[in-house]
Image (cartoon, rainbow, N blue to C red):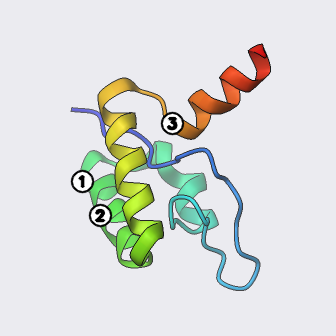
Amino acid sequence: MTIPSPCISVCVTDPGSDLCYGCGRTTPEIAKWSKYSDEEKKQVIEISRTRMHSWQLEAFDKAYKEIIETGTSPIKKQKLQNKKD
């Protein structure tokens, strides 16, 4: 099973912590994602989830579940719909 990227299409990195506001990964983790094994990807997702709290973790879990089920994050779907309008 291929592990989908945890990118939820927020893609803004905090300059102080180097953590993405959307997925909680660091810039190096994002850059190396495609080279990781499935086990490493699972570890990165778990570590990233520990960096999130409250509403951010809840929003991430909801969006990532949709990525797993449909292949696209709800934010990306909304951006694509806005381009059509």
Q: Which residue is mark 2?
A: 43
Residue 46 x %, y % = 30, 66
Amino acid bearing label 2:
Gln
Amino acid bearing label 3:
Pro
Q: Is residue 44 left or right of residue 9?
A: left
Which numbered disc, 2 or 3, marks the residue closer to the eye?
Answer: 3
Please report contact status of discs 2 and 1: CB closer than 8 Å, yes or no: yes
Q: Farthest residue in the front direction?
A: 85
Question: From mark 2 to mark 3, how far is it between C-alphas?
Answer: 24 Å
Q: Which residue is mark 3?
A: 74
Question: From mark 3 to mark 1, how far is it between C-alphas?
Answer: 26 Å
Q: Establish if 72 lies above or below 25.
A: above
Q: Secondary structure at mark 3?
A: helix
Q: Earlier in the sequence, mark 2 or mark 3?
A: 2
Q: Establish if 64 lies above or below 58.
A: above
Q: Residue at x 37, y 63 (%)?
A: 58
Q: Which residue is mark 1?
A: 39
